[in-house]
Image (cartoon, rainbow, N blue to C red):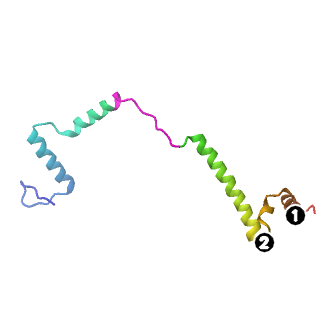
């Protein structure tokens, strides 16, 4: 940390040190402080520059379709793992309609 040349060895924090350097630079170049002028310049530049739209790599409609497809694939894979591996059956049987009719009959106790 630097010390203030005008003080008696008092240490400055980083913000104070930056401000001292900024003031010294302003005095050396005989300019007004940059904080006020930079804000005006930024606002003028923002008003003049046309706003650009963000170009997406994947459009939103494609993202929705991909999420639906991945969700369906995860459901099918989960069915096959649950029925075939955990339930000791044939994994492809989980995709047949007869299996689901049989499960539905068991759940509703119509069998």
Packing grade of label 2 (10 A; few <14, some 14-19, many >=20) is few
| Quadrant (top left, top right, bottom left, bottom right) of the C terminus | bottom right
- Would you place residue 36 above or below residue 103 in this image? above
Name the residue rendered at 8%, 42% in the picture: 28
**Residue with the most extreme right position:** 111
What is the span of residues highlighted in magenta in the rendered image? 46-57
Judge left or right: residue 89 versus residue 70.
right
Q: Which mark is residue 88?
A: 2
Does 58 lie within the magenta span?
no
- Residue toward you, 98 or 101: 98
In the rendered structure, are the residues bearing label 2 and label 1 in contact, judged by CB atoms less than 8 Å apart?
A: no
Task: Using the image as rendered, state which of residue 13 and residue 107 is in the foreground.
Answer: 107
Q: Taking 80 as reference, is 22 above or below it?
A: above
Q: Secondary structure at mark 2?
A: loop
60 sits to left or right of 104:
left
The residue most toward the top is: 48
Q: Is residue 18 left or right of residue 5?
A: right
Q: Which mark is residue 95?
A: none
| Quadrant showing the N terminus | bottom left
Which is nearer the eye, 4 or 75?
A: 75
In percent of width and height, residue 40 lies at 26, 33
Q: What secondary structure characterizes most of the magenta part?
A: loop
Closer-to-camera residue (25/90): 90
Which is more N-terminal, label 1 or label 2? Answer: 2
User: In percent of the image, x 30 and y 30: which residue is there?
Assistant: 44
Count of numbered tags: 2
Tell me the tag on residue 106: 1
Q: Quadrant of residue 86?
A: bottom right
**Mark 1 crowdedness (10 Å alpha carbons): few <14, some 14-19, many ≥20:** few
Q: Position of residue 18 (x, y in %)?
A: 18, 51
């Amino acid at each position: 940390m630097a010390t203030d040349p005008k003080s008696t060895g008092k240490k400055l924090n980083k913000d104070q040190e930056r401000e001292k350097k900024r003031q010294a630079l302003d005095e050396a170049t005989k300019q007004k402080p940059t904080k006020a002028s930079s804000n005006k310049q930024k606002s003028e530049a923002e008003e003049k520059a046309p706003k650009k739209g963000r170009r997406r790599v994947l459009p939103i409609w494609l993202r929705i379709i991909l999420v639906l497809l991945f969700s369906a694939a995860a459901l099918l894979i989960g069915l096959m793992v649950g029925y075939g591996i955990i339930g000791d059956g044939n994994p492809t049987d989980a995709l047949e309609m007869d299996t689901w009719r049989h499960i539905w009959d068991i759940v509703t106790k119509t069998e």
